[in-house]
Image: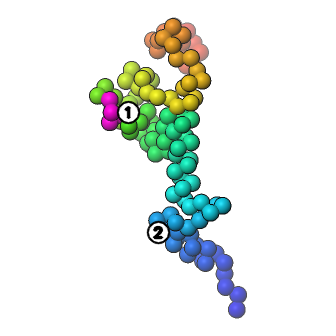
């Protein structure tokens, strides 16, 4: 008798998910290890972990957990481009751009996004 492969694969997938993410997924790495490496990479590149990017998408705001807990002038989730978020660490991507005050254009002086003046 031939057994279907899908239910067996589903059982292993659910057992790994319920077993603390300990089932190796790729090259001996578990789901937890893959998530940790991904979060460390995104934190180094953008200054935010995967959870913070998910919070951004869910709330439509700029969310940074550590910045919000460590600084009195910043909440965990701020409006995009708010004054409190200007001092946030932007990761390696922020180091690539020049962030000196001489080259920064104040938000009120920027042209509208639709390209029309005035």
Mark 2 and mark 1 lie on one chain; the one further toward the N terminus is 2
Q: Residues within 10 Å of mark 2 (few under 14, many from 20)?
A: few
Side (left or right) of 89 relative to 10: left
Q: Among all residues in the image, which is located at the extreme right?
A: 2
Q: Secondary structure at mark 1?
A: helix
Q: Among all residues in the image, which is located at the extreme front?
A: 28
Q: Which residues are magenta?
A: 67-71
Q: Which residue occupies 31% across, 25% down?
A: 73
Residue where numbered disc 2 is placed: 18
The foreground one among 44 and 86 is: 44
The foreground one among 47 and 61 is: 47
> On the image, which quarter does residue 26 sit in?
bottom right
**Residue 72's spot in the image, x, y percent?**
29, 28
**Residue 87's spot in the image, x, y percent?**
42, 23
Colour mode of the rendering: rainbow
Side (left or right) of 22 relative to 55: right
Residue 41's label in the rendered image is none
Query: Disc 2 and disc 1: Cα gap in Å?
Result: 32 Å
Residue where numbered disc 1 is placed: 67
37 falls in the magenta region: no
Q: Is residue 57 visible?
A: no
The foreground one among 3 and 37 is: 37
Q: Which residue occupies 32% across, 29% down?
A: 71
**Residue 66's spot in the image, x, y percent?**
38, 37
Name above or below for residue 68 compared with residue 5: above
Q: Among all residues in the image, which is located at the extreme left?
A: 72
Q: Secondary structure at mark 2?
A: helix
């Amino acid at each position: 008798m031939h057994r279907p492969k899908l239910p067996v694969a589903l059982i292993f997938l659910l057992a790994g998910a319920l077993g603390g993410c300990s089932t190796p997924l790729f090259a001996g790495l578990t789901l937890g290890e893959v998530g940790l490496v991904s979060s460390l990479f995104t934190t180094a590149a953008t200054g935010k972990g995967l959870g913070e990017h998910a919070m951004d998408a869910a709330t439509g705001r700029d969310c940074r957990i550590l910045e919000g807990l460590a600084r009195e002038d910043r909440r965990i989730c701020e409006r995009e481009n708010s004054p409190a978020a200007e001092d946030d660490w932007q990761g390696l991507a922020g180091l690539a751009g020049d962030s000196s005050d001489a080259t920064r254009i104040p938000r009120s002086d920027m042209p509208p996004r639709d390209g029309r003046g005035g």
